[in-house]
Image (cartoon, coloured by chain):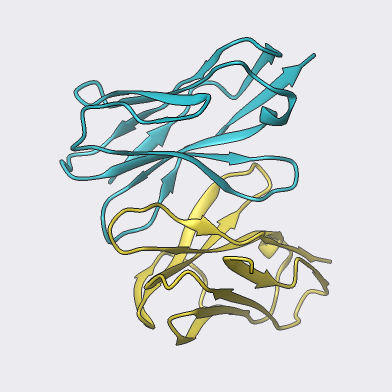
Amino acid sequence: AQTVTQSQPEMSVQEAETVTLSCTYDTSENNYYLFWYKQPPSRQMILVIRQEAYKQQNATENRFSVNFQKAAKSFSLKISDSQLGDTAMYFCAFMKPGTALIFGKGTTLSVSS
Amino acid sequence: DTAVSQTPKYLVTQMGNDKSIKCEQNLGHDTMYWYKQDSKKFLKIMFSYNNKELIINETVPNRFSPKSPDKAHLNLHINSLELGDSAVYFCASSPNRGGGAFFGQGTRLTVV
């Protein structure tokens, strides 16, 4: 069975700084997808970034980028130029095609001015 | 023009009652899900439907019954509600090949 581990329950950062959220996963699959979701206090689940396991190039979306290390089964999220609106809970998730997302326990990120 | 919408957003009910949560998606996705987020914010899959067929049925009490009248709708009916059912329930939809899932705004269910 696949598992997703986020080892940082809480993190805090100042505005404009860079922060990295960690995620590791365990799977014997070769074809899968990895995701980061953001859940602000409004509780809406927002897809931040997506990575296909067969692609070596790390995904980027504006200020958000990932460091995908397939052999190490590591998938960290880097947020550059942090903004107050980035304050949220962040979930790392794994998905095998045709199945459901498996989530980590989340990291609460606080951005302060 | 909300992509995935679920109703109601909040639901407060007494133990023993039966309630339903409705979900609709206009993204044209074939797969829909119900997830439960507990008080510690942990998200867990409950059910998944693909083109109206149940494909994932995790260990969930029989009191929970999903129904998909068509591929754009997936409803969740809960019988004999218990205090432990209090949680946020999310509906989501997904394209078939690993596009991730797009979530509704969640329904906060409180059983008193």
Instruction: Report which quarter residue B103 is drawn in.
Output: bottom right
Which residue is pictured at 50% across the width and 57% down the height?
B102
Q: Quadrant of residue A111?
A: top right
Residue A35 image offset from top left, x and y in percent: 41, 40
Please identify the quadrant where the N terminus of chain B is shown. Answer: bottom right
Q: How many marks?
A: 0
Vertically, is A66 above or below B24?
A: above
Q: Quadrant of the C terminus of chain B?
A: bottom right
Rendered hue of chain A is cyan
What's the residue at 18%, 45% (across, down)? A31
Residue B87: x and y, percent?
68, 58
Residue B102 sits above or below residue A5 on the image: below
> Residue B67, image x and y in percent?
50, 84
Q: Which residue of the protein is positioned furthest toward the bottom in this rendering?
A: B69
Q: Is residue B107 above or below residue B71?
A: above
- At x 19%, y 23%, the residue is A71
Q: Color of chain B here?
A: yellow
Quarter of the view holding residue B49: bottom left
Measured as percent of width and height from the top left, residue A104 is found at 47, 37
Say left or right for B12 vs A84: right
Q: Is residue A58 left or right of residue B103?
A: left
**Quick check: B32 above or below A1?**
below
